[in-house]
Each structure stands twice: as C-alpha cells, then as structure tokens.
Amino acid sequence: MARKTVRTKHRRRPRFRLRVPPWAPVVGVLAVTAAVIGLFFFVRETAAQPRIGDHIHAAVNIYVCGQQEPKLPYFEAGVHSHGDGLMHMHPQVTSEEGAGAAVGKFFEYAHWQLNGSILTLPGDRTFKNGDQCPDGQPGVLRMMKYRLQWRSDSGSHTELADQCSRFADADMEEVEDSPGYVPKDGDCLHLVFGPAGAPSVYGTPTPTGTPGPTPVPGP
C-alpha cells in the first residue's frame, strides 16, 4: 500500500518594513544645518588672529642708515596708522584678518611697499638691498621683534610706543619673513635698512635730536 506524501506549505516570513516618521527628514535637515554652523564657528575660532572685532596694536620703529625715521603718518584702513608709531589692527572685512594684517599688507594699505628686499616710505623714498648709505656701506633690509607683556586693554598706546623705542637690538630676535609677519598684541618691531651687522642706530644723531628722513643714493 503506497504511502501518501504530505506536502507542507512553507509559510512566508513577513517582510520587515522600515517606517520613516514624516518628521524625520526635517530633523535630518536641521541636524546637517547645525553641523555646518558648528563647523563654521569652529573654523572661525581656530583661524589666525586678528579677526573682525579685535583691536590690537604693535609698535613699528623704522631706521635708515643708522638714523630713526619719523613715525609713519595717519592713513585709514582696517589695519591702519594714527601717526602715533603704532600699527593698529582692527579688521573690518575678512581680507584684513589673519595674513591680511601682516606687516607687508600694512604698508600696502598705505600705498607703500615692503617686501624681502625693498622698502618704500612717504615721500616716494625707496631703499633696496645693496643701496649705499651716506658712509658708502651697502644696506640690507631686516626686521627684529620683541613682545612686551602688554595688552591693548591694559595700557595707553603712548606707553607701548615709548617702551618699544628704547629696546636695543640685542634684546630682539630677527624675523625671517618680515612682509608676511602678523604682529601680536604688544609686539615691538624694528624695521631696519642699514649695513649688515650694524646696530639700528649708529653714527652721529641729527643736530636737533629729532629723527629725520635719510636720503640714500643708488649704488
């Protein structure tokens, strides 16, 4: 007697369907927006100073062939001069932030020039590496710095300029990239054109004791 084969029907497993709540896309968009905003502020906080809203200062003294030059005159920009011997760094637009506040940019805003080998000053006076000083020695352009324990919100601007003008070269360190250097609050900068190895100030002072421009003939 033949056995009957009983076939059992396989039950289909129910398919799992992921149900997305209708509000989920909105939450996703908000999360991405928050991440982008957070990244923006993180980048801003870690960006090089100064930034928009900062107002810091560095003293800039200029020496040509052993004599100190008059203070740079007033000019307007986010990085500017009040004619007080200071570099005022108060960026107004993003192009003046960070590297936009470098010493070379400071000169550029005033329509002067400072690069690794050329310095131009008010009066259309230009000094290039190799130009001779009045004593016949060839000059080279260099910059030195020293940072005071000074903050723009803790002392007068006149005090910073006065203290920085009294620093000797031996107290300072040379800056390799003077045009690209971005000063910090309280920096003392000596921009020097003169014989290699010579101090910032040498020779006979002007009779009145007031620093004056020193013409430099070409080679």
Image (cartoon, grey):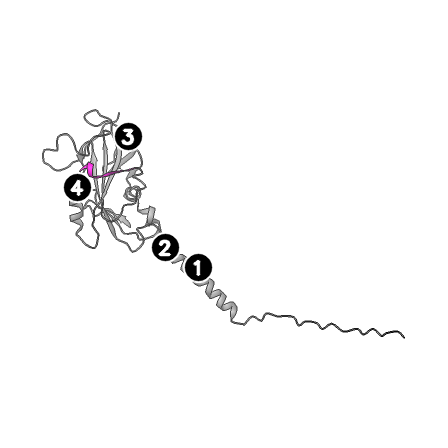
Report, in whole angstroms, how far the alpha carbon at label 3 lies from the one at label 2.
Answer: 38 Å
Q: Name the kind of residue labelled 1 in the image.
A: Val
Report, in whole angstroms, how far the alpha carbon at label 3 lies from the one at label 1.
Answer: 48 Å
Report, in whole angstroms, how far the alpha carbon at label 3 lies from the one at label 4.
Answer: 24 Å
Mark 1–mark 4 CB contact (< 8 Å) = no
**Which numbered disc covers residue 44?**
2
Q: Which residue is mark 1?
A: 36
Residue 182 vertical placement versus 124 (above, below): below
Q: Earlier in the sequence, mark 3 or mark 4?
A: 3
Report, in whole angstroms, how far the alpha carbon at label 1 lies from the one at label 2.
Answer: 12 Å
Q: Name the kind of residue labelled 4 in the image.
A: Ser
Mark 3–mark 4 CB contact (< 8 Å) = no
Which quarter of the figure is the C terminus placed in?
A: top left
Kindly identify the residue that appears in the image at 34 percent across and 50 percent down.
48
Q: Nearer the viewer, mark 3 or mark 1?
A: 1
Q: Secondary structure at mark 2?
A: helix
Q: Earlier in the sequence, mark 3 or mark 1?
A: 1
Q: Name the kind of residue labelled 3 in the image.
A: Asn
Boundaries of the magenta span: 164-175
Horizontal arrangement in the rendering, residue 148 relative to residue 43 (left or right): left
Q: Name the kind of residue labelled 2 in the image.
A: Arg
Q: Nearer the viewer, mark 3 or mark 4?
A: 4
Q: Earlier in the sequence, mark 1 or mark 4?
A: 1
